[in-house]
Image: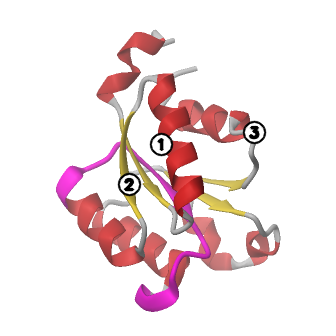
Amino acid sequence: MVPQAHYNRYRILVVEDELHLLELYQKELEDEGFKVITATDGEQAINLNKKALPDLVVLDIKINPAYGGGLEVLKEIKTFDNKIPVILNSAYTTFRADFSTWLADAYVIKSSDLSELKRRIKELLHLD
């Protein structure tokens, strides 16, 4: 188990186009001790993934479709680095049946209670 004080060596890229949610995720994850990088669209997410080399990505499925939406971004991220854990984050359970989501390492339903998201992050970074 990694002490929470050491979480700051882990960089998490959060991709969310709803600014109030993005700010909530950033604050909550920084309060946990993580370094948080944010993106509001797919193009920005892909560029940051390549430059910042995060340890994990939290990706909204329904981001602005100008770059193809969250599932296209997922494919790009996994093409660049297939070992990086990606958590798909969505308000919709219907995407679980989409084969494209199977590239992700986890699927979390959006909630104002971020305990499930935090649990999955720690699990995928082997911090439990």
Q: Residue 83 location in percent, x, y?
A: 38, 52
Residue 104 placement: quadrant = bottom right
Q: Which residue corresponds to the image point at 61% horizontal and 76% vertical from the top-left?
A: 62
For mark 2, what is the residue? 38
Residue 29 belongs to the span the image colors magenta: no
Of the numbered discs in the image, which one, if any, rests on residue 57?
none
Residue 95, above or below 1: below
Pick out the residue farthest to the left. Answer: 51
Q: Estimate how packed mark 3 is, as few (under 14), some (14 to 19) or many (20 or more) residues with alpha carbons within 10 Å.
A: few
Q: What whole-number distance in Å separates the C-alpha atoms at marks 3 and 1?
A: 14 Å
Instruction: Find out whether the residues at labels 3 and 1 contact each other: C-beta distance under 8 Å.
Output: no
Tell me which corner region of the image, top left, top right, bottom left or bottom right, holds residue 73: bottom left
Q: Earlier in the sequence, mark 2 or mark 3?
A: 2
Task: Establish if 74 lies above or below 107.
Answer: below
Identified at 37% across, 67% down, the residue is 77
Which residue is under mark 3? 113
The answer to whether residue 14 is seen in the rendering is yes
In this picture, residue 77 sits left or right of residue 93? left
Q: Nearer the viewer, residue 30 or 4?
A: 30
Q: Secondary structure at mark 3?
A: loop
Q: Which residues are magenta?
A: 51-67
Q: Are marks 1 and 2 in contact (CB under 8 Å)?
A: yes
The magenta stretch spans residue 54: yes
Residue assigned mark 1: 26
Q: Secondary structure at mark 2?
A: strand
Residue beneath the point at 35% across and 66% down: 45
Which of the two labelled residues, at mark 3 and mark 1, occupies the earlier sequence position? 1
Mark 1 and mark 2: span between their CA atoms? 8 Å
Q: Please identify the quadrant where the C terminus is shown.
A: top right
Q: Amino acid at mark 3?
A: Asp
